[in-house]
Amino acid sequence: MITIANPEKYIAGLYERLSNENIEVGNGEVIETKEDEQESGSISTQKLFLRNFCKDNNIQVYDDYTDDGVSGATFDRPDFNRMIKDIENKKINLIAVKDLSRFGRLSSKISYYLEEFFIEKGVRFIAVTDDIDTGHIETSEEMVQFKAFFNEWFLRDTSRKVRNGKKTRAKEGKVMTTYPTYGYKKDPLDYNHYVIDQDIAPIVRRIFMLTRNGMTPTEIGKILTDERTLVPSEIVGNAHTRKDGIKRGWNRNTVKRILQNVTYLGWVSNGNTKKINYKSKKTMIMPKEDRIIKKGMHTPIIDEETFNIVQDMIKSRTSTRVKSYDWLLKGLVCCKECGKKLSLVPQKHPNKTTFYLRCNTYATNTHLGLCTPHSNNLEKVTDFVIEQIKKRCREFLNEEKYTKIANTSKDKIIKDRFNVKNEILILEKKVKDINKRIDKLYEDKYNGLFEDEDFTRLYSRQIENRKQAEERIKQLQELEEKEDSSIDINKLVNDFVNMKEITRTMLVSLVDKIEISESKEITIYYKFNILNMGNEDNKLQNVG
């Protein structure tokens, strides 16, 4: 039984969690249930249980943190994150859960929070029915690890059942998408079946007919945007999933996805994506041959002849890039207005191919007017940039003040490096001494030389001292690994001026990024502050 000495010291955060699971067994029979509901009860039951626990132990409650319908496989949960923020802001110093599985089901994450994060933040963790209390030395780490392992096994086993259930439903041709396909609605009588959306289906048919009549996806996208036709995400209800918050219009890719979707033939395609594993949210796109496709599952919007003709037209327009172009400024050039990289666009002529730079934001969402083309002749831009860098390097070599700055910096860097190494050695010795003190504290506590409260106070102080020392060592090691710019700059600048042919390696060693504005103004940002001193914006007009 858990007892709390000095309860007035604690301000509690009560955490409750429950997730929805759909487990299928037998021949497609779906059991819709709450995760481990028999074990943990509803959210309201958890809240009442934890409130009574705090009342019985005279613990002040700061707030409830509740994640309803969120899996224990992830620790990226809205109220869990709010609780962590309140811990960091020192609003709470005790976390209470009904049992360990409510906290989470990944043993590695549980170990991190219980054995590192909560200790560092001075937070006591209690899982009431599991009799886990980090405020008591009697709490067995082995028991915590065993329960965490068991909870993760439950998650893995449930994941396997759900995966097998989904496979069974996929083979039966059930619709398993959260949101319906554009042009269809979920059947009110059978959530796993599609019925035609009579308001949207004509738009789908029109897209196929326009394509069959020779229009490109880009042209169709422009027509639909000009007509203010709502995009699929606005119709089916998943617009809120967009992370950038930008209101989208129709573009080539949106139209092309509709034209290639076999759902409009009355088919159901399942297994298009697959989660990497039960611990991760990441998914991968599955090859077409590995997907489960069932024909004749709902009323088609497009006939098979039209669909096949459109596929042939798309293939005839799709050119496969045989060669990926490698160019000197690749990855360095960006748009001044939106910050996105500029990409390469080849323009073929009878005798040669000319390359132009184009803003990626403009290329992706042309009709939205989010940016402008920034079309610039690559050859002229490259020649101008190389000449400007060489000019800057000559100025650096010819002006005595820059040499003095570089040499002074070099001497300072060498001295600083010596001091950094010494400080790291001192701190590493300090960490070893702290670890010995912690071991001694445990031994003295075992021998009855300390009360719980004294042990906790002394232990917390040593943990905090060790944390500070380790963080400082990490900072110093990162500083030590940084490239010594002052020592190398003279050689780099000399090479750049004297070499007849400039390589990409030389370029990226000097240049951080190159900005190009719509007015064809080019600004070069160097990796070395000395080269950026007094550096004016450089204009290149009429690049074409």
Image (cartoon, rainbow, N blue to C red):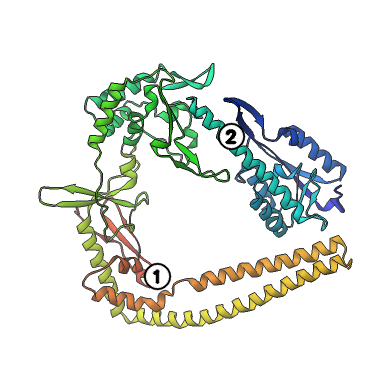
Can you tell which mark lies on residue 162? 2
Q: Quadrant of residue 466?
A: bottom right
Between 182 and 166, the one lying in front of the other is 166
SS category of the residue bearing label 2: helix
What is the CA distance from the residue labelled 2 to the residue labelled 1?
A: 57 Å
Instruction: Work out whether 180 lies above or below 146.
Output: above
Q: Quadrant of residue 182?
A: top left
Callout 2 environment at 10 Å: few (<14), some (14 to 19), or many (20+)?
A: some
- The amino acid sitting under disc 1 is Asn
Instruction: Work out whether 341 lies above or below 494.
Output: above
Can you tell which mark lies on residue 529? 1
Picture coordinates of residue 439, whole percent (x, y): 77, 69
- Whether residue 187 sits left or right of residue 157 in the image: it is left
Picture coordinates of residue 534, whole percent (x, y): 34, 69
- The amino acid sitting under disc 2 is Val
Q: Residue at x 21, y 72 (%)?
A: 500
